[in-house]
Image: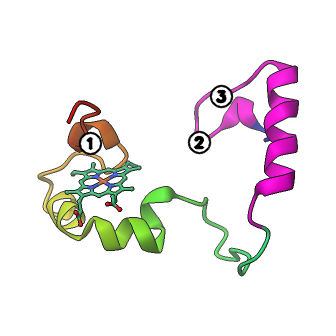
């Protein structure tokens, strides 16, 4: 939350009051358990166990070059269902 101006290569800065409110929420409700990631790599949604388990076929297509990026969630998840 303190480095949002360089968030995965994008500027995700927030107005200070908004940032404070979200920080407070995360401190109170965020998970603090679980082993720390010592791999040194950035945490990525697309490498979490749940994402991988739910996206086996999508990951197969991505590895074959049939899907450009797994992070383009909206390419497969259309909000109008
Ligand atoms: C290449 C297509 C594709 C992309 C890109 C993709 N998804 Fe999915 N996603 C799927 C498919 C297909 C399923 C359904 C898997 C199933 O039903 O078991 C799924 C399932 C899910 C589920 C599980 C829903 C449930 O019922 O539990 C979540 C959450 C989800 N995707 C989030 C994301 C997010 C967040 C991103 C972007 C970071 C993303 N997906 C990118 C195709 C994709």
Residue beneath disc 3: 12
Instruction: Kindly check if marks 2 and 1 are in contact, taking CB atoms under 8 A apart as contact.
Output: no
Does label 2 point to a residue whose CB lies under 8 Å from ligand 1?
no
**Placement of 65 over or under 59, stated as above or below:** above
Cα–Cα gap, marks 2 and 3: 9 Å
Give the residue displayed 17% in from the left and 66% down from the top. Answer: 57
Q: Main secondary structure of the magenta part?
A: helix
Q: Is residue 32 above or below residue 78?
A: below
Q: Is residue 16 left or right of residue 42?
A: right
Residue 55 location, quadrant: bottom left
Q: Quadrant of the N terminus?
A: top right
Residue 9 shows in the view: yes
User: Residue shown at 79%/69% (left/top)?
Assistant: 32
Residue 25 magenta: yes
Residue 58, compared with residue 69, is above or below; it is below
Question: What element does badge 1 sit on?
Answer: loop
Select label 2 or label 3 by which is in front: 3
Who comes first in sequence, dot 2 or dot 1? 2
Which label is found at residue 77?
1
- What secondary structure is marked by label 2? loop
Query: Label 2: which residue?
Result: 8
- C-alpha distance separating marks 1 and 3: 23 Å
Bounds of the magenta segment: 4-31
What residue do we see at 22% from left, 45% from top? 68
């Amino acid at each position: 939350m303190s480095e949002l101006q360089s968030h995965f290569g994008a500027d995700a800065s927030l107005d200070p009051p908004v940032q404070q409110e979200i920080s407070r929420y995360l401190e109170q409700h965020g998970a603090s358990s679980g082993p720390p990631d010592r791999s040194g790599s950035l945490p990525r949604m697309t490498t979490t166990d749940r994402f991988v388990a739910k996206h086996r076929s999508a990951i197969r297509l991505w590895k074959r070059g049939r899907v450009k990026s797994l992070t383009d969630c909206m390419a497969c998840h259309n909000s109008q269902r």
